[in-house]
Amino acid sequence: MRKTLTAALTGLATILAAQSALAERVNVGLLLPFSGVYASLGNEIEAGFRLGLEHFSDDLGVEINIIREDTEVNPANGLARARKLVMQDGADVLVGIVSSGVLGAIRDFVHGAQVPLIVANAGNDEATGERCSPYITRLSFSNGQVNRPMGRWMAEQGVRRVYTLGADYAAGRQMVGGFTEAFVEAGGEIVGQGWTPFQQTQDFGPYLAQARASGAEALFVFYAGGEAISFVNQYDSFGMAEVMPLYGSGFLTSQLYVNAQGESANGVITSLHYVPTADNPENTAFVEAFQASIGRLPSEYGVQGYDSARALVEAIRTGATDRESLANALRQVSFEGPRGALSIDPATNNVIQPIFVYETVSGENGAMTQKVLATLPAEADPANGCVMPAPVTN
Ligand code: PHB
C-alpha cells in the first residue's frame, strides 16, 4: 500500500515537473547540418525557423530556448548529437534533420526516448512508413511524395524512355525509386540507372557519358546542396541540354542555390512541394518577410523551417504540458501556409500538401526563377507498413 502510494507520488512529481517545465519554457534541440554538403540547407532551415517563431509566438507566454547542434551529414554524429540534446541539455522537442541517412540513424533513439521530433527536411520514407512513430511528425515532405507525381506527369507529357542518376544513399534511392515506380506504372520505361557515391563525387563526367550513351530521351536525377550545383553545371558544360533534357526532384534547382547554377539551370523541369513564386496570399507575405529579414528569396528549406516553428507554436498553444501531449498535438496541426493547405496524415504523420511542377527560367536582372507548369493535388503517402496508434484528442 505504502509502496504503491510512494510510486504514485513519484510518478505525479515527475509529471508535475515536466508540466511546469513545458508551461514556462520549451527547450528546442535544433539538429541541423552546419557543415558538409548540406550546410547551406541547415542554415536556411534555421533562418526560416527563427522567422516563424518571431511571427507566430506572440503572446505565447512560454519561453522557447533553442540549443543548436551540428549533425554534419553523418548518421553516427547525428545520433550522438541527438542523444546529447535530450540526455544532457534536456531538450523537450527536437527540430530539424536534413539527411535521410541521419533520420534513419536517430529514429530508434527518438522513439525509445519518447521525445517529439519535428522533421524539417529529411524525406526518409521509412520514418513515416514501416518505422513510423507517434513521436515523429514530418512537416517537410517524404521522398516518394515529391517524385511520384512527377513520374505520372512526365508520362502524360509523352516522355517515354528515361535514364536516372542519383546520390547513392537513402534519399537518392527513394526519390528516384518513387519517380521510377510511378513513371513505369504510367507506361514509361527506365533504360538505365547510375548511382554516384554520396558526398564523394566531384566529377560527374563518367556518369553523364553513360547516360548519354544509353540513348534515353530524357534524364531524371536527385541531387541537392553542393552536389546539385556541381551536377547542373557539369551537365551543361557537357553539352547534354541539346541531346537529353534534364528533369528531377525540385531540390536540384532550389532557389537556395539556383543562382550559383545560373544559365546552366535554364529549362530544367522538376517537381517540389514549394516554389517561391507560388501564387497565394500567405506566400506573398512570407516571401516579403523573409526577404526583409534575411535579404534573399526563401527556398523550400526556409519554408520548412518556418512551418516547423508554426507547428510547434500551435502545438504548445493547445496547452500541451509534456512531451506526450506535445507529440500528440503536433500530429494534429493543419494550416494554410505559403505552400497552400497543409495537414498531417494521421496514418503516417507525414505532411499532406500539393506538389508543383516547375521549370527554371531566366528572370529579371539575370536571376533565375521558377515558372509553375502544373500544381498537382495533395496526395497522402500509402501507409508503407506504418502502424500508428490513433492520436488522443486533447
Ligand atoms: C534527404 O536526405 O532526405 C534530403 C536531403 C536534401 C534534400 C532533400 C532530401 O534537398
Image (spheres, rainbow, N blue to C red):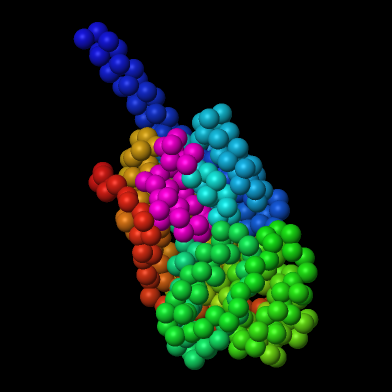
Q: Position of residue 154 (x, y in %)?
A: 50, 84
Q: Foreground residue, 358 or 296?
A: 358
User: In the rendering, at what x and y percent does residue 289 appear?
Assistant: 55, 62
Residue sitting at the far left: 1
Q: Which residue is drawn at 62% across and 54% down?
A: 42
Residue 262 makes an appearance in the image = no
- Can the viewer see residue 185? yes
On the image, the x and y values in percent for residue 23 come to 39, 34
Q: Is residue 266 above or below residue 249?
A: below
Residue shown at 45%/35% (left/top)? 113
**Residue 318, picture quadrant:** top left
Q: Give the range drawn in magenta.
A: 108-137
Q: Nearer the viewer, residue 287 or 33?
A: 33
Residue with the most extreme top position: 2
As drawn, 276 above or below 267: above
Find residue 85 and report its image quarter: top right
Residue 314: in magenta span:
no
| Image quadrant occupied by the C terminus | top left
Looking at the rendering, in which quadrant would you find the N terminus? top left
